[in-house]
Amino acid sequence: MIFGGGIHKEMTKEIIKTLPKRDQDQVFQGLYDKGYSVPDIAKATDIPAPTLYNRIDAHRGRKEGKLAG
């Protein structure tokens, strides 16, 4: 679970919505680079996976040194 559950998840989603799109994309890219899958990020944010694939550099692979571990 990326953002926890219940009120924590809802608050996090609302906070992300207030960010400029560029900053949202950085958050999503950071989660992806840490090892979260696009489908997991999509489920946690209620953003369709195809949209997220367009907003992050998933096609380039994860950036070195940022993998969870």
Image (spheres, grey):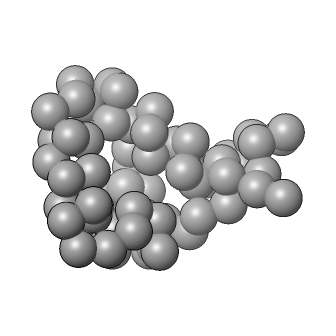
Residue 23: quarter of image? top left
Q: Nearer the viewer, residue 60 or 9?
A: 9
Q: Nearer the viewer, residue 53 or 2?
A: 2
User: Total of numbered circles in the picture?
Assistant: 0
Q: Quadrant of the C terminus?
A: bottom right
Residue drawn at point x = 21 percent, y = 40 percent: 15
As drawn, 62 above or below 25: below
Report whether residue 56 is seen: no
Does residue 10 show up?
Answer: yes
In the figure, 37 relative to 63: above or below? below
Instruction: Report x, y in % for residue 35.
Output: 67, 61
The residue furthest front is 7
Percent position of residue 37, x then y? 56, 68
Residue 63 lies left or right of residue 4; in this view the side is right
Q: Position of residue 4 (x, y in %)?
A: 39, 68
Residue at 33% across / 36% down in the picture?
24
User: Seen in the image, is 21 located left or right of residue 37?
Assistant: left
Identify the residue shown where x is 39% and y is 62%.
3
Residue 49, image quadrant: bottom left
Foreground residue among 45 and 3? 3
